[in-house]
Image: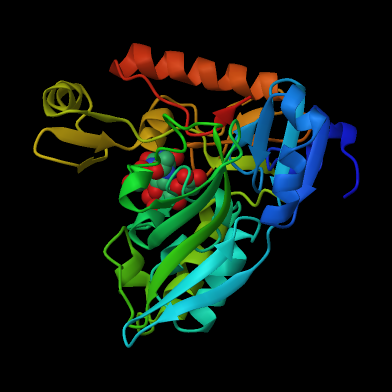
Amino acid sequence: MNGFKNNYCLKNLNSFGVNAKSKFFKSFSSENDLVEIMSSKTFEENKILILGGGSNILFTKNFDGLILQNKINLISIIDEDDLTTTVEVGGGVNWHDFVLWSVNRNLSGIENLALIPGSVGASPVQNIGAYGMEVKDTITKVHTFDIAQGTKKIFNNKQCKFNYRDSIFKSELKNKKVITKVEFKLSKTALNIISYGNIEKELKKDPSPMNIAELIIKIRQQKLPDPIKIGNSGSFFKNPVISLLKFKKIKKKFPEIISYKVTENKIKIAAGWLIEDSGLKGHREGDAGVHKNQALVLVNHGKSTGKEILSLSNMIKDVIFKKYDVMLETEVNII
Ligand code: EPU
């Protein structure tokens, strides 16, 4: 195995496209590679950060440790019955490539998650979701290595403690596990999840996984900035979930607020609406900005630093808190 790279530039490894360096860097293409890395001195002596597609991370400074990038690149069918196909996918596979792989085989379960940037290994961490679908509903197992012990553990779906944009890998086990592979159970019949927003109205063809994925790709391309052209990491904040009582108070003052019922007593409110209603959509401070079409997305117009994007996000949090008494939580990992 080759050595570790030193003082490694991360600009092309984070979708915000901000400049930062890592003291050490190494990628791995198999579980064996990882085991070998884990027995090295560099691994033992440094703090570790696992990088997937770099699409949900904001570097506000250089990383004084070892960054490991998962490049395990396999997709294999491991089980099949009349109704389902179970697939094992390497954490290094690009998420959208896996969605295309599935819809090309007419398999259903992740088609609404087309064009979400990032890697398969990162998908369970924040339980990626869009247009009425969440990855927690197809994941059956997550293969991991413990960073401190080097031991292997396979988590079943329940053990992952999935929640809205959350899992055990983002909470109690944050930065403690390397996700090497993920297993998904996909359906041979179309799940037909089209009730979100205008999907049903806009879907002019039958709701096959391919047709839904094509529509979602079109919608995302119209609304969300392409990280290749303009640095961003999708939604920067989560949609806050608040009590019904608090929601009623806010709604009295702001009757147009957009919300969704989560449970009898919990309401999710659209953070994008709050930001737009505060007049911050399209707002810019230097090269750090709020996207002009989707206020939940912060963008790097070119030369912004991670610190500048962070400071813009703090300003937004302040404005929203003062106006609506709601504290926004970041979805993106801040380093
Ligand atoms: N809205 C505004 N102004 C804005 C943005 C949104 O008024 O600038 C309103 C919209 O009109 C709509 C509502 O807010 O009525 C919800 O907007 P949208 O459908 O765009 O979804 P979102 O709640 O803002 C979430 C996810 C996205 C995902 C979309 C579609 C989170 C944090 N974000 O955004 O995920 O693509 O739903 O399902 O839950 C991501 O996580 O990176 C991401 C892009």
Q: Residue furthest left?
A: 264
As rendered, which of 41 and 208 lies closer to the eye? 41
Rendering quarter of residue 26: top right
Question: Where does the C terminus fall, quadrant-wise?
Answer: top right
Q: Tell me, what colour scheme is on the image?
A: rainbow
Inspect this view and state whether residue 254 appears: yes
Rendering quarter of residue 151: top right
Q: Residue at x 19, y 31 (%)?
A: 255
Q: Tell me residue 280's x, y (percent).
A: 49, 27
Q: Is residue 255 left or right of residue 132?
A: left
Q: Residue at x 30, y 68 (%)?
A: 193
As rendered, which of 209 and 284 lies closer to the eye? 209
As rendered, which of 123 and 291 lies closer to the eye? 123
Q: Is residue 66 left or right of residue 235?
A: right
Q: Tell me residue 120's x, y (percent).
A: 56, 56
Q: Tell me residue 99's x, y (percent).
A: 53, 68
Q: Residue at x 36, y 30 (%)?
A: 274
Rendering quarter of residue 136: bottom left
As rendered, which of 264 and 203 lies closer to the eye? 264
The number of numbered discs placed on residues in the rendered structure image is 0
Q: Tell me residue 141's x, y (percent).
A: 43, 57
Vertical placement of 192 versus 93: above or below?
Answer: below
Looking at the rendering, the quadrant in which ligand 1 lies is: top left
Q: Residue at x 45, y 26 (%)?
A: 279
Inspect this view and state whether residue 304 appears: no
Q: Residue furthest bottom?
A: 82
